Amino acid sequence: MGSLISELMGQPDEQMDHMLGIDERRKGECSRHGNFIDIHYSGKGRVSEGWKGCPECADEAIQARMREEERQRQLEMMRERAVRFVAKSGIPKRFADKGFDEYRPVSGKSASVLRKIQEYGDLLASGKHEGRSLILLGNVGNGKTHLSCALLRDVILRTCKPGEYWTFAELIREVKGSWRKSSDYSEQDVYDQFAKPELVILDEVGMQNFTEFEQTVAYEAINARYLLEKPTVLITNLPASDLNKCLGERVVDRLRENGGKALGFDWLSYRQGGDAA
């Protein structure tokens, strides 16, 4: 009862102070909070020895630390989520651990292409891409898949948004699979699934005959993402002059809209140096 009365009267209670380890008090002045009673702890209780200063400043410091701890906790949760997205992205095992740092340019042009793809990744990570897509075309074995997978991983980790790697053959198989009587999904479901990730890499385009059906699939898939303003990276060994003929003019137009670029890989095969690309 004495402690309660002392607290209400603004007077220290010696017995309570002793229990708490308080051995001295003095007047203090805080430049932000004004006058206060500074408390010195002996270190014999639960509180470390020393003067504790302005209690309001101390409370603010505690609140700031708690906010920072919560921020770090949220960041760690986002990192773990992004890592899960990478694991589910479909990046081929061969390229699972190959980032931008593992790509070794073999010429000035290949170094320039690497820089442009990294800049494109910065644009995607900023969220200000307006659905701008990218076409990587040219010689076999000079790093198109390597760089696209590095881009996909980088963007997922920086944005904590899902992305997926597809081959065009996989897309065709999924569409044809929807026609089976036993199928539990429709053709439209395939296009909806293809449009869902924030970034999609569509590889090995041009290895087909490009029948009217294949052109239709390419258009429906690319258009689904185009309407949602989501970027697509298309990889092909076709020369630029054959793109319209094989893919169809509407597909190429969708990919080139809003500043979409085509980067040519026309130097000596990257694999000739013994490196997978």
Image (spheres, rainbow, N blue to C red):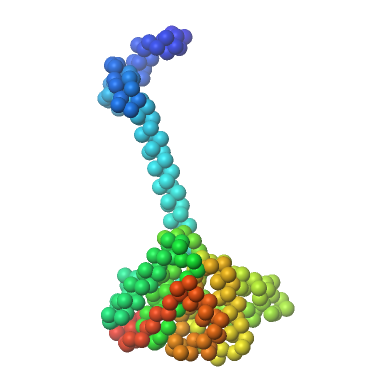
Give the image location of residue 250, x and y in percent.
56, 81
Choose top left, top right, bottom left or bottom right for residue 190.
bottom right
Residue for point 36% across, 12% down: 12
Residue lying farthest right?
Answer: 181
The answer to whether residue 230 is visible is: yes
Residue lying farthest front?
Answer: 258
Give the image location of residue 110, x and y in percent.
32, 79
Choose top left, top right, bottom left or bottom right for residue 24.
top left
Give the image location of residue 264, x and y in percent.
39, 83
Quick check: 42 left or right of 63? left
Residue for point 48% across, 72% down: 258
Quick check: 81 left or right of 171? left
Residue for point 36% across, 17% down: 19
Residue for point 46% across, 61% down: 127
Give the image location of residue 166, x and y in percent.
51, 75
Choose top left, top right, bottom left or bottom right for residue 219.
bottom right
The answer to whether residue 94 is visible is: no
Residue nearest the viewer, comparing 235 with 112: 112
Q: Quadrant of the C terminus?
A: bottom left
